[in-house]
Image (spheres, rainbow, N blue to C red):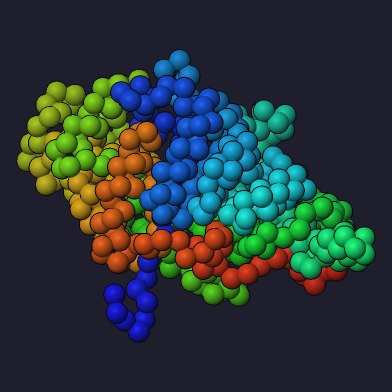
Amino acid sequence: MNSSTPQRSMILGAQVMNYGSAEAAWRWPGSDSRTYLNPDTWAETAHVAESGKFHFLFIADHAAVREDLTHQKPSATIDPIVVVSHVIDHTERIGVVLTQSTTFNFPYTVARQLKALDLLSGGRIGWNAVTTNDPTIAANFGVPVADRATRYERAHEFVQLVQALWGSWGPDALKLDTEAGVFADASEIRPIDLGGRHVASRGPLPIPPSPQGQPILFQAGGGAEALAFAARYASGVYSMATDIETGREHRRALQDAATRAGRAPEDVKLFMGAFTTVADSTEEALARREALLRLSATPLSTKVRQLSALVGLDIPASGLREPLPAQDRALLRPAPYQLHSKKAVRLLEEGRSPYEVILRGITDFHTTFLGSPEEIADEMQELFEADACDGFVITPDVVSDGLPAFAEKVVPVLQRRGLFHEDYESATLRGHFGAPHQYGRDIAGAGCGTKWNA
């Protein structure tokens, strides 16, 4: 497009969940049931995303068993560090954002592992810093869950220590002067010797900077504490927003908070999570989702109860495939503070059957895009151009064929519309985001050898 002002372009991530977002993805015909254990599948998934010019892979984590593994797949990978170590060896340009907890880790361990991955990947690593509050995870580490204020206080200390450690090897310290016998300038590799109420570290790290300096940060979570945390440190935020209204609200709040924190508001990008089902038509997409639902271990009655709670009406199990009677539609009310409740009411009021509304993903966590490539691109374009987000984290219903379908069919539509880049403009994740350079962190003016209290 010819314009003096470049058109805003969306940023896309692909979330790497085992098999896909659908509960029964592991049973889908053509899906390798051994995907969870097969490193070649991880590499192939990354390759597909890279061929579709996705900016990054997003790897969530949950350090505990939370599913009934009798019939359900684990949602988390075997270990993010291990998976990413393999993925970066089989990709060249796509970034990788992986989750590490600030609650059940040590700053030095996280700083060392992530900076090593960043260096070996050529500057393509991002850190999704989370303040874990799940008691099943806490039990695996033998400690209780701290209150929210304490967890975020620790998170602030943790991130600042990690970033200080990342900068403890001076940017020009590496010399590799074989003639003079000088490996590095040791005067530029200095301990940080910092500690707060919750964490401390001496340093330094024995790792020089990557081409992007250091990993960028992501944040996922809600509430005032999470907003302030993201505004101060994050380049990307994985939002719970599901529509234009909630997306705009979160994005404006995030930009305002970033400004108050002394950052440029455009330096913090907001991403909307999206489950996708790509087909040649809406009807074929609904048929695919119905087939996946039939393979699911979760009873349909459970989803009917969830839908009932969203719309304030006890929907009977009989007649699910027919539109609600007029007298019932008049009683529909969106549940306050519940994801998708307004959309659920709207679809039922339009005459969609409760069964179709369930197939459309109303009871799922993220918003669902389903239908033809053009229909999915329409929804993404509407949200993006309404400033409800800066991009999306795409999770296909089934990774094995759903991710290739998105990359091969939806991405070209977005590109033709000028909404998505044709190719990578940068070799680093920081470059993909247009994030400013950062290396290390000056903590309240503290120099090396100074004790710091957050």
Q: Is residue 300 left or right of residue 236?
A: left
Q: Quadrant of residue 295?
A: top left
Q: Is residue 134 left or right of residue 369?
A: right
Q: Residue furthest front?
A: 179
Where residue 76 sits in the image (x, y, percent)? Answer: 52, 33
Q: Nearer the viewer, residue 319 or 89?
A: 89
In the figure, 138 relative to 152: above or below?
above
Q: Residue furthest top?
A: 70
Where residue 318 sits in the image (x, y, percent)? Answer: 14, 23
Asked if residue 268 shows in the view, the reply is no
Q: Quadrant of residue 403?
A: top left
Residue at x 17% of width, y 42% of height: 280
Q: Nearer the viewer, residue 228 or 6?
A: 6
Asked if residue 395 shows in the view, the reply is yes
Work out which quarter of the rendered image holds the C terminus and state it. bottom right
Where residue 140 sits in the image (x, y, percent)? Answer: 67, 28
Residue at x 10% of width, y 42% of height: 351
Work out which quarter of the rendered image holds the N terminus and state it. bottom left
